Image (cartoon, rainbow, N blue to C red):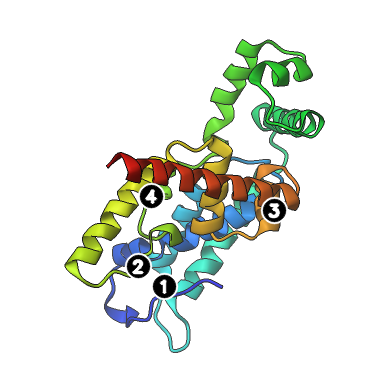
Amino acid sequence: MLLTKGYSEQTISPDKLVADHMHIVRKIAWHMYGRVGRMVEVDDLLQVGYMGLIDASRRYKPKAGASFGSYAAIRVRGSIVDFLRDNASVCRSTIVMQQKVRAATAKLEQALMRAPEKEEVAEELGIEVGQLEEWETRFAASQVKSLDELYTDQSKLFSDGAHTVEDKLQNQQMKAMLRRALGQLPEREALLLQLYYVEELNVYEIAKVLGVTTGRVSQIKKAAVERLRKFIAEMEEGE
Protein backbone atom coordinates (compact mmCIF):
# COMPACT_ATOMS: atom_id res chain seq x y z
CA MET A 1 0.00 0.00 0.00
CA LEU A 2 1.38 3.38 -0.96
CA LEU A 3 1.41 5.90 1.84
CA THR A 4 0.35 9.43 1.03
CA LYS A 5 1.12 12.72 2.72
CA GLY A 6 -1.28 13.94 5.33
CA TYR A 7 -0.95 17.69 4.82
CA SER A 8 -3.45 19.97 3.12
CA GLU A 9 -2.50 19.85 -0.55
CA GLN A 10 -4.36 22.98 -1.62
CA THR A 11 -1.31 25.11 -0.73
CA ILE A 12 1.40 22.79 -2.04
CA SER A 13 3.19 23.69 -5.27
CA PRO A 14 3.60 21.13 -8.07
CA ASP A 15 7.36 20.98 -7.42
CA LYS A 16 6.73 20.21 -3.76
CA LEU A 17 4.22 17.51 -4.65
CA VAL A 18 6.76 15.88 -6.96
CA ALA A 19 9.57 16.04 -4.40
CA ASP A 20 7.39 14.55 -1.65
CA HIS A 21 6.02 11.69 -3.76
CA MET A 22 9.03 10.41 -5.70
CA HIS A 23 8.94 7.27 -3.56
CA ILE A 24 5.72 6.33 -5.38
CA VAL A 25 7.58 6.23 -8.69
CA ARG A 26 10.35 4.04 -7.30
CA LYS A 27 7.92 1.59 -5.75
CA ILE A 28 5.70 1.25 -8.84
CA ALA A 29 8.64 1.11 -11.28
CA TRP A 30 10.39 -1.66 -9.36
CA HIS A 31 7.16 -3.61 -8.90
CA MET A 32 6.47 -3.40 -12.63
CA TYR A 33 10.07 -4.31 -13.43
CA GLY A 34 9.68 -7.43 -11.32
CA ARG A 35 6.64 -8.49 -13.35
CA VAL A 36 7.67 -7.90 -16.95
CA GLY A 37 10.53 -10.37 -17.09
CA ARG A 38 13.25 -7.70 -17.39
CA MET A 39 12.33 -6.98 -21.01
CA VAL A 40 13.02 -3.30 -20.35
CA GLU A 41 15.56 -1.44 -18.29
CA VAL A 42 14.43 -0.27 -14.86
CA ASP A 43 15.93 3.18 -15.52
CA ASP A 44 13.50 3.54 -18.44
CA LEU A 45 10.56 2.73 -16.16
CA LEU A 46 11.80 5.18 -13.52
CA GLN A 47 12.18 7.95 -16.11
CA VAL A 48 8.70 7.35 -17.51
CA GLY A 49 7.30 7.18 -13.99
CA TYR A 50 8.89 10.49 -13.02
CA MET A 51 7.37 12.12 -16.10
CA GLY A 52 4.00 10.71 -15.07
CA LEU A 53 4.45 12.16 -11.59
CA ILE A 54 5.30 15.59 -12.97
CA ASP A 55 2.25 15.45 -15.23
CA ALA A 56 0.10 14.43 -12.26
CA SER A 57 1.36 17.36 -10.18
CA ARG A 58 0.26 19.79 -12.88
CA ARG A 59 -3.13 18.22 -13.52
CA TYR A 60 -4.13 17.54 -9.92
CA LYS A 61 -7.16 19.38 -8.58
CA PRO A 62 -7.66 18.87 -4.81
CA LYS A 63 -10.97 17.22 -3.99
CA ALA A 64 -12.39 15.82 -0.79
CA GLY A 65 -11.34 12.21 -0.33
CA ALA A 66 -8.94 12.26 -3.29
CA SER A 67 -5.33 12.66 -2.13
CA PHE A 68 -2.54 13.55 -4.50
CA GLY A 69 -0.71 10.33 -3.61
CA SER A 70 -3.59 8.18 -4.82
CA TYR A 71 -4.04 10.26 -7.97
CA ALA A 72 -0.31 10.24 -8.70
CA ALA A 73 -0.07 6.46 -8.29
CA ILE A 74 -2.74 6.02 -10.98
CA ARG A 75 -1.01 8.43 -13.36
CA VAL A 76 2.45 6.93 -12.78
CA ARG A 77 1.23 3.36 -13.25
CA GLY A 78 -0.68 4.40 -16.38
CA SER A 79 2.41 6.07 -17.86
CA ILE A 80 4.51 2.97 -17.30
CA VAL A 81 1.84 0.65 -18.71
CA ASP A 82 1.59 2.83 -21.84
CA PHE A 83 5.37 2.75 -22.22
CA LEU A 84 5.46 -1.03 -21.89
CA ARG A 85 2.68 -1.39 -24.44
CA ASP A 86 4.43 0.91 -26.93
CA ASN A 87 7.74 -0.93 -26.53
CA ALA A 88 6.45 -4.50 -26.29
CA SER A 89 7.86 -5.47 -29.69
CA VAL A 90 11.28 -3.85 -29.25
CA CYS A 91 14.12 -6.38 -29.50
CA ARG A 92 16.70 -5.84 -26.79
CA SER A 93 19.74 -8.04 -27.41
CA THR A 94 21.35 -6.79 -24.22
CA ILE A 95 18.44 -7.99 -22.11
CA VAL A 96 18.41 -11.35 -23.87
CA MET A 97 22.12 -11.81 -23.18
CA GLN A 98 21.61 -10.73 -19.59
CA GLN A 99 19.08 -13.50 -19.16
CA LYS A 100 21.49 -16.02 -20.68
CA VAL A 101 24.25 -14.97 -18.29
CA ARG A 102 21.94 -15.30 -15.31
CA ALA A 103 20.75 -18.71 -16.45
CA ALA A 104 24.33 -19.92 -16.97
CA THR A 105 25.36 -18.58 -13.57
CA ALA A 106 22.43 -20.28 -11.84
CA LYS A 107 23.20 -23.57 -13.61
CA LEU A 108 26.84 -23.47 -12.56
CA GLU A 109 25.98 -22.49 -8.99
CA GLN A 110 23.78 -25.56 -8.71
CA ALA A 111 26.37 -27.85 -10.28
CA LEU A 112 29.41 -26.50 -8.44
CA MET A 113 27.69 -25.67 -5.13
CA ARG A 114 29.46 -22.30 -5.15
CA ALA A 115 29.51 -19.05 -7.07
CA PRO A 116 31.15 -19.69 -10.46
CA GLU A 117 34.22 -17.82 -11.65
CA LYS A 118 33.87 -15.45 -14.58
CA GLU A 119 35.93 -17.81 -16.74
CA GLU A 120 33.51 -20.66 -15.98
CA VAL A 121 30.48 -18.57 -16.92
CA ALA A 122 32.12 -17.51 -20.17
CA GLU A 123 32.94 -21.13 -21.02
CA GLU A 124 29.36 -22.18 -20.29
CA LEU A 125 28.13 -19.48 -22.69
CA GLY A 126 30.72 -20.35 -25.32
CA ILE A 127 32.26 -16.87 -25.39
CA GLU A 128 35.55 -15.28 -24.35
CA VAL A 129 35.97 -13.73 -20.91
CA GLY A 130 36.56 -10.36 -22.55
CA GLN A 131 33.24 -10.64 -24.37
CA LEU A 132 31.46 -11.49 -21.13
CA GLU A 133 32.99 -8.44 -19.47
CA GLU A 134 31.82 -6.26 -22.36
CA TRP A 135 28.29 -7.59 -22.00
CA GLU A 136 28.37 -7.04 -18.23
CA THR A 137 29.38 -3.44 -18.79
CA ARG A 138 26.53 -2.94 -21.26
CA PHE A 139 23.75 -4.30 -19.06
CA ALA A 140 25.08 -3.37 -15.61
CA ALA A 141 23.02 -0.17 -15.56
CA SER A 142 19.79 -2.12 -16.05
CA GLN A 143 20.75 -4.76 -13.51
CA VAL A 144 21.54 -2.50 -10.60
CA LYS A 145 20.11 0.88 -9.75
CA SER A 146 22.59 3.38 -8.31
CA LEU A 147 23.50 2.43 -4.76
CA ASP A 148 23.11 6.09 -3.85
CA GLU A 149 19.37 5.30 -3.67
CA LEU A 150 20.16 2.74 -1.01
CA TYR A 151 22.14 5.17 1.09
CA THR A 152 19.25 7.49 1.98
CA ASP A 153 17.28 7.97 5.15
CA GLN A 154 14.24 6.47 3.39
CA SER A 155 15.75 3.03 3.82
CA LYS A 156 14.61 0.89 6.73
CA LEU A 157 18.30 0.14 7.20
CA PHE A 158 18.89 3.79 8.07
CA SER A 159 15.71 4.55 10.04
CA ASP A 160 16.55 7.13 12.68
CA GLY A 161 15.01 6.41 16.08
CA ALA A 162 17.55 8.48 18.00
CA HIS A 163 16.43 11.31 20.27
CA THR A 164 19.42 12.77 22.14
CA VAL A 165 22.31 14.56 20.46
CA GLU A 166 24.61 11.70 21.46
CA ASP A 167 22.20 9.12 20.05
CA LYS A 168 21.87 11.02 16.79
CA LEU A 169 25.64 11.31 16.45
CA GLN A 170 26.06 7.60 17.07
CA ASN A 171 23.27 6.86 14.58
CA GLN A 172 24.96 8.99 11.92
CA GLN A 173 28.23 7.17 12.53
CA MET A 174 26.45 3.85 12.12
CA LYS A 175 24.88 5.04 8.87
CA ALA A 176 28.29 6.01 7.51
CA MET A 177 29.70 2.67 8.58
CA LEU A 178 26.81 0.84 6.96
CA ARG A 179 27.28 2.76 3.72
CA ARG A 180 30.91 1.67 3.57
CA ALA A 181 29.97 -1.93 4.34
CA LEU A 182 27.26 -1.99 1.66
CA GLY A 183 29.80 -0.77 -0.86
CA GLN A 184 31.81 -3.93 -0.21
CA LEU A 185 28.96 -6.30 -1.04
CA PRO A 186 28.77 -8.21 -4.32
CA GLU A 187 26.52 -6.45 -6.82
CA ARG A 188 23.62 -8.90 -6.59
CA GLU A 189 23.59 -8.94 -2.78
CA ALA A 190 23.51 -5.13 -2.68
CA LEU A 191 20.64 -5.09 -5.19
CA LEU A 192 18.68 -7.64 -3.18
CA LEU A 193 18.98 -5.58 0.01
CA GLN A 194 17.90 -2.51 -1.92
CA LEU A 195 14.84 -4.24 -3.33
CA TYR A 196 13.89 -5.71 0.04
CA TYR A 197 14.56 -2.81 2.41
CA VAL A 198 14.21 0.26 0.19
CA GLU A 199 11.75 -0.72 -2.54
CA GLU A 200 9.90 -3.16 -0.23
CA LEU A 201 9.38 -5.85 -2.87
CA ASN A 202 8.37 -9.29 -1.65
CA VAL A 203 10.49 -12.41 -2.22
CA TYR A 204 8.48 -13.44 -5.28
CA GLU A 205 9.00 -10.08 -6.99
CA ILE A 206 12.69 -10.05 -6.04
CA ALA A 207 13.06 -13.55 -7.47
CA LYS A 208 11.70 -12.31 -10.81
CA VAL A 209 14.04 -9.30 -10.84
CA LEU A 210 17.09 -11.43 -10.08
CA GLY A 211 16.01 -14.37 -12.21
CA VAL A 212 16.32 -16.89 -9.37
CA THR A 213 14.02 -18.99 -7.18
CA THR A 214 12.45 -17.66 -3.99
CA GLY A 215 14.62 -20.08 -2.05
CA ARG A 216 17.70 -18.60 -3.65
CA VAL A 217 16.50 -15.12 -2.70
CA SER A 218 16.45 -16.19 0.95
CA GLN A 219 19.94 -17.64 0.63
CA ILE A 220 21.34 -14.49 -0.96
CA LYS A 221 19.67 -12.27 1.64
CA LYS A 222 21.07 -14.36 4.49
CA ALA A 223 24.56 -14.25 3.00
CA ALA A 224 24.33 -10.49 2.44
CA VAL A 225 23.22 -9.78 6.01
CA GLU A 226 25.95 -12.02 7.44
CA ARG A 227 28.54 -10.31 5.26
CA LEU A 228 27.31 -6.88 6.40
CA ARG A 229 27.58 -7.89 10.04
CA LYS A 230 31.13 -9.11 9.47
CA PHE A 231 32.17 -5.90 7.69
CA ILE A 232 30.65 -3.71 10.40
CA ALA A 233 32.25 -5.77 13.19
CA GLU A 234 35.65 -5.44 11.51
CA MET A 235 35.23 -1.67 11.14
CA GLU A 236 34.19 -1.32 14.79
CA GLU A 237 37.27 -3.27 15.88
CA GLY A 238 39.47 -1.04 13.76
CA GLU A 239 38.22 2.18 15.35
Q: Residue 93 or 109: which is nearer the viewer?
A: 109
* Residue bearing mark 2: 17
Rounded to the nearest angstrom, the CA distance separating label 3 from label 4 is 25 Å
Q: Which mark is residue 35?
A: 3
- Image quadrant where one finds the N terminus: bottom right
Q: Tag 2: Cα neighbours inside 10 Å, few (<14), some, or many (≥20)? A: many
- Circles 3 and 2: CB distance less than 8 Å? no
Can residue 37 be seen here? yes
Q: Nearer the viewer, mark 3 or mark 4?
A: 4
Q: Residue at x 38, y 58 (%)?
A: 158
Rounded to the nearest angstrom, the CA distance separating label 1 from label 4 is 31 Å
Does 91 appear above or below 228?
above
- Image quadrant where one finds the C terminus: top left
* Residue bearing mark 4: 151
Rounded to the nearest angstrom, the CA distance separating label 2 from label 4 is 22 Å
Left or right, residue 161 beside residue 155: left
- The amino acid on which the numbered mark 2 sits, given as a three-letter code, is Leu
- The image position of residue 150, as x and y in percent, is 43, 50
- The image position of residue 151, as x and y in percent, is 38, 49
Q: Nearer the viewer, mark 3 or mark 1?
A: 3
Q: Residue at x 39, y 60 (%)?
A: 154
Does 48 appear above or below 161?
above
- Circles 2 and 1: CB distance less than 8 Å? yes
Q: Tag 4: Cα neighbours inside 10 Å, few (<14), some, or many (≥20)? A: many
Q: Which mark is residue 100?
A: none
Quick one: SS at disc 2? helix
Quick one: SS at disc 3? loop
Q: Nearer the viewer, mark 2 or mark 4?
A: 4
Q: Nearer the viewer, mark 3 or mark 2?
A: 3
- The amino acid on which the numbered mark 3 sits, given as a three-letter code, is Arg
- The amino acid on which the numbered mark 4 sits, given as a three-letter code, is Tyr
Q: Tag 1: Cα neighbours inside 10 Å, few (<14), some, or many (≥20)? A: some
